[in-house]
Amino acid sequence: MEVVVKAKPEPIKLDTKRTALIVVDMQNTFCKKGGIFDFLGRLDETKVKRIIGVNKKVIEACRSIGIKVIYLRMGYKQDLSNAGGPDSPNYYKELGFVAMRGNPELMGRFLTAGTRDWEIIDELKPQTGDVVVDKHRYSGFVNTELDTILNSNNIKYLLFIGLATNVCVESTLRDAYFHEYFPVLISDGCGNIGPESTQEATIWNVTEVFGWVSTSHDLIQALR
């Protein structure tokens, strides 16, 4: 089925059989008390609650017509062997790893595979037929099977929701563009970290350079 979604800078036509929804890092660590965002004083519970509500509607709408739902999940092995050592910029910049490295008592608390912190939130739990891709860098394409999964399902169009707009969402969306996918950012289904200008900057980047920007309302209306 082909649908036309109202978007900026212009409407985009999607073949729903070749479209996937990418749900980025909707994990306890980024959405709930006790996670890394809470530890850093950057958890905006009102914003997160709104985003979860939007995500529910978008996921349900996509599932209802057979659009594949793919969850990205950020995390490290228990021994942190895939987090990167001193030769990796991730060692110095990734918030969860830096927090644990600077506070040894926190080791294994944030973004660690198998922990509650690492799990996808209960409100958006994957269902049968959904796919979960584990990653250990901001982009979901780096050292993961994401591109293989998309190619094997003949996917060409990607819808993006999740956290954080200006970090993991934008990083994955940019890589999607470079991998020849058509990326569509669902702006109200994503939340930024930092000042609101960062949300606006990502929306500008996607609109003008890397893809298309729509809203949950316009996407759901088109899918109906």
Image: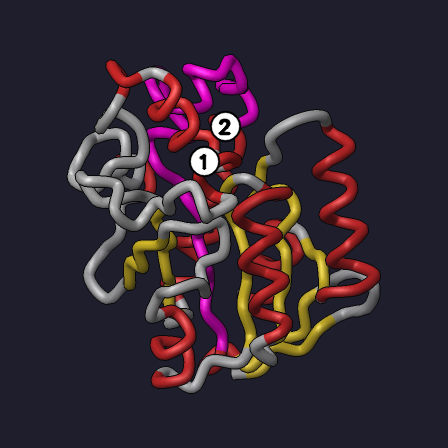
Q: Which mark is residue 163?
A: none
The residue wearing badge 2 is 48
- The answer to whether residue 209 is left or right of residue 65 is right
Which residue type carries mark 2?
A: Val
Proximity of marks 1 and 2: CB atoms separated by less than 8 Å? yes
* Residue drawn at 39 percent across, 19 percent down: 102
On whether residue 148 falls in the magenta region, the answer is no
Mark 1 crowdedness (10 Å alpha carbons): few <14, some 14-19, many ≥20:
many
Q: Which residue is mark 1?
A: 52
Query: Under tag 2, what secondary structure?
Result: helix
Whole-percent x, y for residue 156 in the image: 53, 80
Image quadrant in which you'd find residue 30: top left
Magenta span of residues: 19-48
**Is 79 rendered above or below residue 42?**
below
Residue that extends furthest to the front in the rendered view of this protein:
87
Say which quadrant the C terminus sits in. Answer: bottom right
What residue sits 27% from the left and 30% below the top? 117
Left or right, residue 52 beside residue 132: right
- Amino acid type at circle 1 is Ile
In front of the other: 108 or 11: 108
Quarter where residue 175 is shown: bottom right
Height in image: 73 above or below 121? below
